[in-house]
């Protein structure tokens, strides 16, 4: 193993774990390849190359090695007629790709050395890669982890999505408020992608449908769109672990069929000549920053249909190039819908099969339900996607006809099969008649799929009795559970090389191939010497994060303090507010009893709020206001610090998670579908304080109830309280701390410049409190005290931490994807290790 350039005294962040790579000849070849790219692709000398030039040169040199394996993979799939998986997602939150590629190809060490010989520091250079934020949060990150696992397990898979010019907005905090700025990840080009201008499809919108009578009295339908837009493919190779198999992420970009109207241009109308192009390209211009609420805009529906239609045409083309009969599609193809955003694919598939490939309706329907399956991600009523019928009729007239027919046949079938009340028909219908007529995309996805899955055991159970209660009764057995997972390659091996080295020492180097081997850590969990080394790695990670906090916020934090972290989208159900209330409680206590032996603590927050979500933005402001007061209060003496880090994204998560002592997973029970942040933290050895919500329930089962801090109402209790009517006033009055905390907030202790700023927020807790913040506060507060007690006993603390890492193996996305492959897609896979 090549050690030069890594150096035994290097910071914990630098260097990799053992991956069995790094011959000297390999280094020389890479150095030559990087220099070659710098010279002939970028056109620069080493002397005047910037870090960005070096990054692009390195990425291109590494990409060449991926391409060879990519072609091999394609040939193999083609030769074996392997069944393919298509993962359709409006979001892929992939983050930076350089370390994914280096690690999966075992090239990190040799590239580090090759660059060092060229005078370039890999860790510094890595920072210039833009963070590809083509997603809002968990749903998009899941798609990215799944892409990594599908390639790792040698599944013949394609990801399909949109190549947004601008990903999720860049967040800045000014005077404590969130400001949104456009994100510009493509401004210096993207070395990972291959433009495929020759792969383009026409996507129609609007217009009318012509019904043409056939001699036998049936009708053929011809859609004459009023507008046509081109979808152009951009391919990014996705190499799996050890580079055995390379899949493709194909993202679509929108173009107008004509670059400009020459007649208008020649008339002197230079702007008008471009309007059609601008309208067309708007489709792939920007990611909607709506996390849990549908954007509702027409453009959003255009985006959904645009990428779905291109993807369906593309996969049918590929199928017909290899197999002559369209009827064999279900044997060769599985299509996964990541949430309802791509659900219009069901109607589009029917349109292509019936109108274009001239299949009978029944045959087409058998194919459609044979290929599709759908993942539900939320039970929040406001996030269940629906589209107004008049909008659908105007924009997708043929699809609306098809949806009506699907609905009629679906309801007929149910009527014939037994007693169905009018009330049940209303609940089962694809059309919601309650508030204007709207198409329920979740229902469409359900009826058109052979399997529907939830993303944690609890969420799947709730799905069966809430949103899909009646559909589950009508189609029993369709709903299955697939608890989410994360790729350990990014979230442990890359993000935390120091801990990974220790794990390899204890569990053997092969642990990176077999997550089950993590269990061997249990044997050293109470070995004091080992614990100390794990603690030293954590401390180094905290120093690294401390530097980021100092740079970003000018706040100095003590690496020996307890780092208590909540990073995720800002949402009322995720209850950052509960965490802030506890922060205020601690602050008040330190002020009233300054000489007690307080445990120094740093509360770390990060997360974006949807631009239109005022309450969430106010919570960001509150966190920053509390930070300002607490951090500058001399009586606190640094015993409590609050840091809100701006612009949460994948790269920031990679820096924060390995430095966390405590992971906050405190959503109102029944509201978080799964969570994956919870898994990343526990895997890295942070102890969770959390509710029995989403995958927290299963994390508790795996790590053991003594190694996780569970508190608060259960989903059932939340439901019961809501039915009963929430009596927050009584709850608050009975709490030993809440009245004082809420009074402080309401009276402007944290907003002296605007004393009334938080009165509305406090009133919403006092009189309504839908999210049960006050109901859960006392048990949350008590659990935080348990954490303090454990922190004082370092031996027990580190044992619990190591047991968390040891027992998190099941939460690998390799496990999740294996389950999808076997039970939903029925495709072959090749396990690693
Ligand atoms: C993992 C991840 C999420 C999801 O976090 P939750 O805590 O599960 O909501 C969101 N954003 C980023 C950048 C992530 O890496």
Image (cartoon, rainbow, N blue to C red):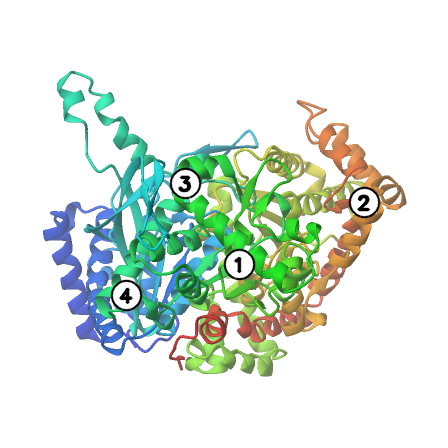
Residue 628 picture location, percent across and down: 62, 35
Residue 296 visible to the viewer: no
* Residue at the image point whose x is 65% and y is 45% from the top: 576
**Which label lies toward us, 1 or 3?**
3
Residue 473 visible to the viewer: yes
Q: In terms of secondary structure, where does tag 4 sit?
A: helix
Q: Is residue 176 left or right of residue 331?
A: right
Number of other residues with Cα within 10 Å of mark 4, as a class: few under 14, some 14 to 19, many 20 or more = some
Q: Is mark 4 within 8 Å of ligand 1?
A: no
Whole-Å distance between the Cαs marked 2 and 1? 61 Å
Q: Which residue was labeled with disc 1?
A: 447
Number of other residues with Cα within 10 Å of mark 1, as a class: few under 14, some 14 to 19, many 20 or more = many
Label drawn at residue 643: none
Whole-Å distance between the Cαs marked 3 and 4? 27 Å
| Mark earlier in primary sequence (1, 3) | 3
Q: Which residue was labeled with disc 4?
A: 319
| Mark earlier in primary sequence (4, 2) | 4
Q: Which residue was labeled with disc 3?
A: 397
Q: Is residue 500 left or right of residue 785?
A: left
| Mark earlier in primary sequence (2, 3) | 3
Q: Foreground residue, 75 or 108?
A: 75
Q: Which residue was labeled with disc 2?
A: 593
Which corner quadrant holds the N terminus?
A: bottom left
| Mark earlier in primary sequence (2, 1) | 1
Using the image, determine if residue 478 lies above or below residue 600: below
| Mark earlier in primary sequence (3, 4) | 4
């Amino acid at each position: 193993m090549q050690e030069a350039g890594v150096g035994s005294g290097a910071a914990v962040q630098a260097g990799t774990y053992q991956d069995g790579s790094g011959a000297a000849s390999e280094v020389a070849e890479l150095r030559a390849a990087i220099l070659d790219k710098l010279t002939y692709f970028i056109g620069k000398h080493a002397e005047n190359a910037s870090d960005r030039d070096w990054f692009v040169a390195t990425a291109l040199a590494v990409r060449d090695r991926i391409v060879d394996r990519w072609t091999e993979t394609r040939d193999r799939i083609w030769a074996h007629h392997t069944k393919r998986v298509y993962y359709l997602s409006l979001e892929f939150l992939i983050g930076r790709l350089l370390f994914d590629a280096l690690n999966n190809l075992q090239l990190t060490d040799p590239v580090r050395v090759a660059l060092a010989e060229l005078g370039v520091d890999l860790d510094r250079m890595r920072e210039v890669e833009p963070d590809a934020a083509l997603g809002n949060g968990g749903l998009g990150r899941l798609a990215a982890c799944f892409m990594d696992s599908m390639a790792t397990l040698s599944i013949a898979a394609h990801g399909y999505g949109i190549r947004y010019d601008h990903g999720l907005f860049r967040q800045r905090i000014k005077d404590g408020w969130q400001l949104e700025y456009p994100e510009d990840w493509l401004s210096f080009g993207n070395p990972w992608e291959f433009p495929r201008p020759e792969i383009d499809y026409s996507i129609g919108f609007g217009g009318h449908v012509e019904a043409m009578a056939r001699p036998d009295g049936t009708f053929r339908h011809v859609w004459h769109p009023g507008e046509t837009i081109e979808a152009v493919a951009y391919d990014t190779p996705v190499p799996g672990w050890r580079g055995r198999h390379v899949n493709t992420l194909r993202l679509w970009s929108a173009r107008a069929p004509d670059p400009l109207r020459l007649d208008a241009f020649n008339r002197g109308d230079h702007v008008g000549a471009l309007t059609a192009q601008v309208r067309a390209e708007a489709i792939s211009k920007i990611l909607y920053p709506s996390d849990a609420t549908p954007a509702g805009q027409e453009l959003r529906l255009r985006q959904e249909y645009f990428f779905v239609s291109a993807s369906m045409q593309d996969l049918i083309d590929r199928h017909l190039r290899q197999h002559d009969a369209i009827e064999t599609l279900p044997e060769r193809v599985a299509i996964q819908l990541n949430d309802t955003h791509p659900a219009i694919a069901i109607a589009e598939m029917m349109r292509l099969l019936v109108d274009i490939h001239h299949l009978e309706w029944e045959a087409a329907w058998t194919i459609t339900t044979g290929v599709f399956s759908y993942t539900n991600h939320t039970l929040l009523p406001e996030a269940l996607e629906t589209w107004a019928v008049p909008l659908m009729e105007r924009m997708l007239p043929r699809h609306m006809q098809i949806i009506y027919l699907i609905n009629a046949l679906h309801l007929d079938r149910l009527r014939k099969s037994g007693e169905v009340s009018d009330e049940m028909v209303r609940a089962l219908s694809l059309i919601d008649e309650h508030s204007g007529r709207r198409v329920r995309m979740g229902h469409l996805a359900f009826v058109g799929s052979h399997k529907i899955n939830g993303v944690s055991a609890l969420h799947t159970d709730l799905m069966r009795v809430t949103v899909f209660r009646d559909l589950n009764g009508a189609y029993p057995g369709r709903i299955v559970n697939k608890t989410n997972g994360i790729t350990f390659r990014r979230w442990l091996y890359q993000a935390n090389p120091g801990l990974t080295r220790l794990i390899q020492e204890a569990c053997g180097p092969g642990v990176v191939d077999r997550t089950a081997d993590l269990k061997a850590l249990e044997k050293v969990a109470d070995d004091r010497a080992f614990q100390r080394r794990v603690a030293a790695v954590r401390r180094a990670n905290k120093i690294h994060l401390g530097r980021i906090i100092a740079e970003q916020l000018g706040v100095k934090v003590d690496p020996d303090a307890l780092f208590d972290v909540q990073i995720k989208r800002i949402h009322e159900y995720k209850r950052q507010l509960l965490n802030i209330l506890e922060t205020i409680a601690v602050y008040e206590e330190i002020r009233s009893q300054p000489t007690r032996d307080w445990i120094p603590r740093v509360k770390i927050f990060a997360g974006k709020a949807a631009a239109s979500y005022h309450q969430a933005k106010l919570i960001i402001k509150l966190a920053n206001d509390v930070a300002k007061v607490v951090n500058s209060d001399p009586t606190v003496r640094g015993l409590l610090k609050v840091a809100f880090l701006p612009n949460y994204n994948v790269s920031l998560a990679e820096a924060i998670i390995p430095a966390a002592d405590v992971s906050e997973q405190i959503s109102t029970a029944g509201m978080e579908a799964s969570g994956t942040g919870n898994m990343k933290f526990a895997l890295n050895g942070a102890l969770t304080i959390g509710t029995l919500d989403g995958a927290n329930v299963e994390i508790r089962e795996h790590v053991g109830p003594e190694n996780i801090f569970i508190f608060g109402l259960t989903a059932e209790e939340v439901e019961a309280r809501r039915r009963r009517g929430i009596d927050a006033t009584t709850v608050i009055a009975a709490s030993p701390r809440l009245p004082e905390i809420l009074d402080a907030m309401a009276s402007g202790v944290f907003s002296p410049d605007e004393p009334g700023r938080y009165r509305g927020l406090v009133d919403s807790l006092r009189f309504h409190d839908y999210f049960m913040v006050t109901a859960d506060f006392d048990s949350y507060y008590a659990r935080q005290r348990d954490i303090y007690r454990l922190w004082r006993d370092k031996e027990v603390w580190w044992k619990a931490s190591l047991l968390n890492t040891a027992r998190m193996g099941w939460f690998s996305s390799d496990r999740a994807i294996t389950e999808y492959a076997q039970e939903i897609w029925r495709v072959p896979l090749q396990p690693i290790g």
